[in-house]
Amino acid sequence: MKYAKNLGQIFLLDNNIAKKIVNALYYKKNKQSINVIEVGPGQGILTKYLLSSNLLIIEIDSRYVNLLRNKFPLLKQRIINLDFLKFNPLHFNFTNFILIGNFPYSISSQILFYILKYKDLISECIGMFPKDVGERIVNKRNLSGLTILIKSYFKTKYLFTVNNSVFSPKPRVKSAVIQIIKRNNKKNINYSILNKIVKTAFNQRRKKLKNSLKHILFKKNFSSHPIFNQRVEQLSVKDFTYLSRKVIINGCIK
């Protein structure tokens, strides 16, 4: 079966690595059954190690949907032919689930935005990313706006590097397996406000916050805080969540 270049299909061939990825999941470590959504399983190298979970499979390529339904007949009704980025887990009553997949590298950022969109439903994600993307996700320095948003709601951990020789077709770069786990007690962070602050600050990243955030209304006297003399590259994730809690909501978010 030919690979679909337009879908960014790159398939893992090493069963030991596949097993290592799945065994890193929380429910595997604690021997608990839980809802799992696998994204882009291709030929099912991860799937066969996920059968003890309440598994739902999303595959965009109808050729592999048919292959998987033949390979795993008991999962036939739970293999969905759909673009994952358009998938709404609430339509399947998945309100607490783990996300796993060797994600297409062309949609790495979209996967992270999807996790943010359904952050209240996703308890954990383990996924394959290009190595440089994986490093940015876990890095504590040189943070991007997207990384700050992810780290505000999730803990991130670099699990291991995967050599490009164990894939077909062989990618040009090495890969990284990353774990993303929901933080506790983060419901008090208003996502709309945090997103507004992050986007505004990063769109004018050369300016000090007192200039880039001057149109956002903060609580009385807070604008005199020393943090406003800094630029975005000087701020931590905690700094951004701290700023978000000091915003006058009705004066900032429309």
Image (cartoon, grey):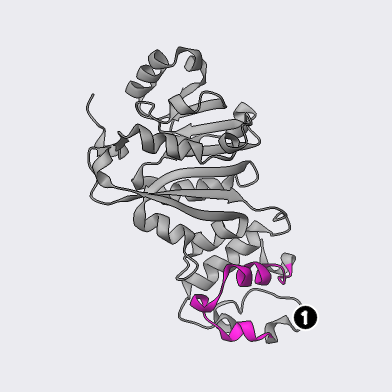
Q: Quadrant of the C terminus?
A: bottom right
* 45 versus 26 height, above or below: above
Instruction: List the residue tagged with mark 1.
Output: 220
Q: Position of residue 146 (x, y in %)?
A: 50, 59
Going by the numbered disc 1, the residue's amino acid type is Lys
Q: Position of residue 155 (x, y in %)?
A: 58, 55
* 205 versus 152 height, above or below: below
Q: Quadrant of the N terminus?
A: top left
Q: Residue at x 39, y 16 (%)?
A: 71
Q: Residue at x 45, y 70 (%)?
A: 142
Q: Is residue 231 magenta?
A: yes
218 or 121: which is nearer to us?
121
Name of the residue lying farthest toward the right: 220
- Answer whether residue 81 is visible to the viewer in this image: no
In the displayed structure, does residue 88 sit left or right of residue 22? right
Q: Position of residue 75 (x, y in %)?
A: 49, 17
Q: Residue at x 62, y 36 (%)?
A: 30
Query: Bounds of the magenta span?
Result: 225-248
Q: Is residue 246 magenta?
A: yes
